Amino acid sequence: MTKVKRRLRGVDYLVIFLIFIFSVIFSLTVRERYKKREIYLISNVVSNKGIYLNKSEYYVAINSEVELDIDNKYNINYSISFPNNDILRVENNKIIANNYGDVKFEIIVDNEKMAEGIIYVIKGLRKRDNEFDKTKTYVSCNEFSEEENELLDKALIDRVDSAGNMTRAGVVEVIRFITLDFDRRIAYFYENGRLNSYGQRKVDGEGRYYHKGLYISEKKYDDIAYKLTGPASWGCPLTQFTTAARYGFSSGGKMPNGFDCSGFVSWVLYNGGFDVNDSGAGDIPSRHDDLYDLGEKRFLNQELLDSGLVKVGDLVAYSGHMAIIGGIDNEGYYYVAESLPNFKGVVLNKYDQYKLKNTFTHIMLMDSVYKEDGKLTNMWY
């Protein structure tokens, strides 16, 4: 009997041990499932306490406030941690960009890191003003390094993605970035040709630049497929073949490379997500590949302006010139982005309705091209 009792007691221990092991495995499985429900994954930024970053990289101008895109729907208390540095400063509980450089930061909840990211304070960006600053200096030849060029390109992509790539808002954001955020002006240059070579020399990057990003370093020469007198990035001297004495252009002379009117609009559309080809500003009935052929072409008159059909991102034109609307304020002013020699390059001009309809003859309503508005705003302030 004693031996039997001992054997039974051993079986009991074995059963208890097995039950314990099963319980541990079951508990870990349930816990793992529960944890998976709590983990948030947005743009590769993870948090496991119901708070996360919508993006992990931020590109800001010096002396501007850094606004982190934090999703905190449960109103969890958190703190932002970054090492002591001279790039960022805290002022009235706001993070201010103090110097050029980059700083990594962490989102902390209950002394635990929930998410992390990096802030780039980059050369070439400025705080966005209410109006275009015509006193900005012109971009000079290769003044930006390849790394600085890359960061500015990333900043442009970030702005477009936040507004909505391949939407009307994305295109409008390109306009506002290059005229209001970029801390340089871009000169006018009569084109030497274009990639869409119908009736033109087949030339790339000379008065136009039908590629993604800013053409401000020699690294971008890798993109250039066809040359005449280039390559030359924006601001670099380039031989051109148009004579316009009143603007200082003479055939065979050198001028800083930049944009002509349709080259600028084509670049804006392309960087907003719309490949419209390297198209010109002509209104030629026998052709169907110019910017005039986009969207719904309408005569610009007071009735159309009063109709509510005209939106930011629509194109405006007159014979030989193309521009694009970057803003419409509550007082009825239109902010038109355009590049002309008399404006000395790319500008964002302010037009009242009278001046707009007496300057431009047509509007291309672009709903059929954009299809979606994205996060569209009529103004940037």
Image (cartoon, grey):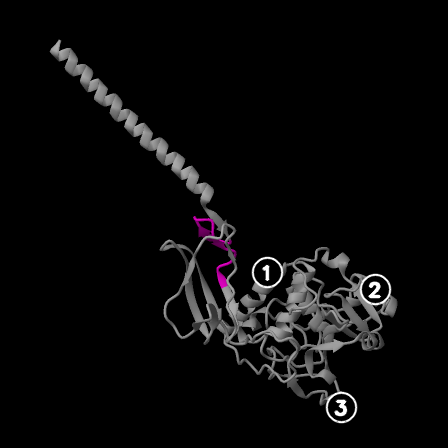
Q: Is residue 120 visible?
A: yes
- In the displayed structure, 175 sits above or below 373; it is below
Number of marks present in the image shown: 3
Q: Does the magenta portion include 125?
A: no
Picture residue at 55% right of the left edge, 74% below the top: 125
Q: Which residue is mark 3?
A: 246
Q: Earlier in the sequence, mark 3 or mark 2?
A: 3
- The residue mark sitting in front, 3 or 2, is 2
Left-right relation of 361 to 238: right
Q: CA distance from mark 2 to mark 1?
A: 29 Å
Q: Are marks 2 and 1 in contact (CB under 8 Å)?
A: no
Q: Earlier in the sequence, mark 1 or mark 3?
A: 1
Q: Which residue is mark 2?
A: 297
Q: Amino acid at mark 1?
A: Ser
Q: Does the magenta portion include 50?
A: yes
Left-right relation of 14 to 329: left
Q: CA distance from mark 1 to mark 3?
A: 42 Å
Query: What's drawn in magenta, residue-wise?
Result: 43-57
Q: Are marks 3 and 2 in contact (CB under 8 Å)?
A: no
Image quarter of the C terminus: bottom right
Picture residue at 77% right of the left edge, 57% below the top: 368
Q: Which residue is mark 1?
A: 162
- The crowding category of the residue bearing disc 3, from other C-alpha atoms within 10 Å (few below 14, some 14 to 19, many at least 20), is few
Residue 211 in percent (x, y) is at 63, 67
Picture residue at 19% right of the left edge, 19% below the top: 10
Residue 83 in percent (x, y) is at 37, 67
Q: Amino acid at mark 3?
A: Arg
Q: Quadrant of residue 344?
A: bottom right
